Amino acid sequence: MRISFIGTGAITEAMVTGIVGSGLDVAGILVSPRNREIAARLAGRFPLVRIVKDNQQAVDAADVLFLAVRPQIAEDVIPKLKFRKGQKVVSVIAATDRPTLLGWIGEEVELTQAIPLPFVAEREGVTAIYPPNRAVAAIFAALGT
Ligand SMILES: NC(=O)c1ccc[n+]([C@@H]2O[C@H](COP(=O)([O-])OP(=O)(O)OC[C@H]3O[C@@H](n4cnc5c(N)ncnc54)[C@H](OP(=O)(O)O)[C@@H]3O)[C@@H](O)[C@H]2O)c1
């Protein structure tokens, strides 16, 4: 499975750190170039992590795509991206409801919303997801419960 992240900030750094070494069957982790320092740090620490050239490349390569930008910029970023029908997309964006996210995505994706906390880095996070999704639950189960 290839996992991509749009938005390489604090919570992406925590999720990536937790996923590496979690035992999940991950062939690659692709992170978007911003934030530059965090992306470079992750790619430097973990051979599985690669920095893509732009957000669309992260979408195209993803079996599971995480949206992890701040709510204030999400409306600017997400509608510009082209998603695949049926693609697994996980939004961790706060305070943004499902119809709004689906409107921005503009495609029939398999959307899950999740609320990870920084403890996922130590694989001790308790993460709520909605709606239930087996593949997404398996990822967060590997990062805690
Ligand atoms: N932190 C948490 O514990 C936590 C927990 C659950 C959910 N969340 C949610 O997760 C999301 C991210 O939170 P965060 O704490 O990780 O915030 P953050 O550290 O500010 O990370 C957001 C990242 O998005 C990047 N970004 C800005 N413009 C972008 C663009 N056009 N394309 C791609 N990336 C872009 C920023 O890069 P630059 O630095 O270069 O601007 C920044 O690194 C938010 O919606 C937040 O509510 C956070």
Image (cartoon, helix red, strand yellow):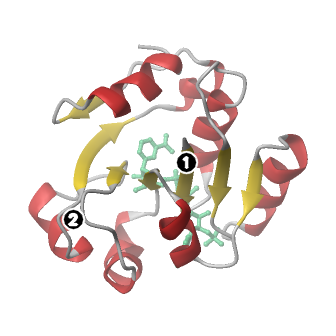
Query: Could you say whether the residue bearing mark 1 is in a helix, strand or loop?
Result: strand
Instruction: Check disc 2: other Cα within 10 Å, few if <14, some if 14-19, many if 20+.
Output: some
Which sits earlier in the primary sequence, circle 1 or circle 2?
A: 1
Q: Position of residue 80 (x, y in %)?
A: 38, 86
What x and y, as percent, mark residue 125? 48, 20
Residue named by callout 2: 101
| Rendered view: 87 above or below 115 | below
The percent position of residue 103, horizontal first and vertical second, equals: 15, 73
Mark nearest the camera among 1 and 2 is 1
Residue 17 falls left or right of residue 58: right
Q: Give the residue type that dot 2 points to.
A: Leu
Mark 1 C-beta closer than 8 Å to ligand 1: no
Amino acid at circle 1: Ile
Residue 141 shown left or right of residue 106 in the figure: right
For the residue pair 44 and 74, the one nearer the viewer reads as 44
Q: Which mark is residue 122?
A: none
| Residue bearing mark 1 | 3
Farthest-out residue, right: 44
Instruction: State the count of labels.
Output: 2
Which of the 4 image quarters holds residue 45?
Answer: top right
Q: Please give the name of the residue rendered at 62% of the width and 79% of the height, measured from the top-left corner.
A: 54
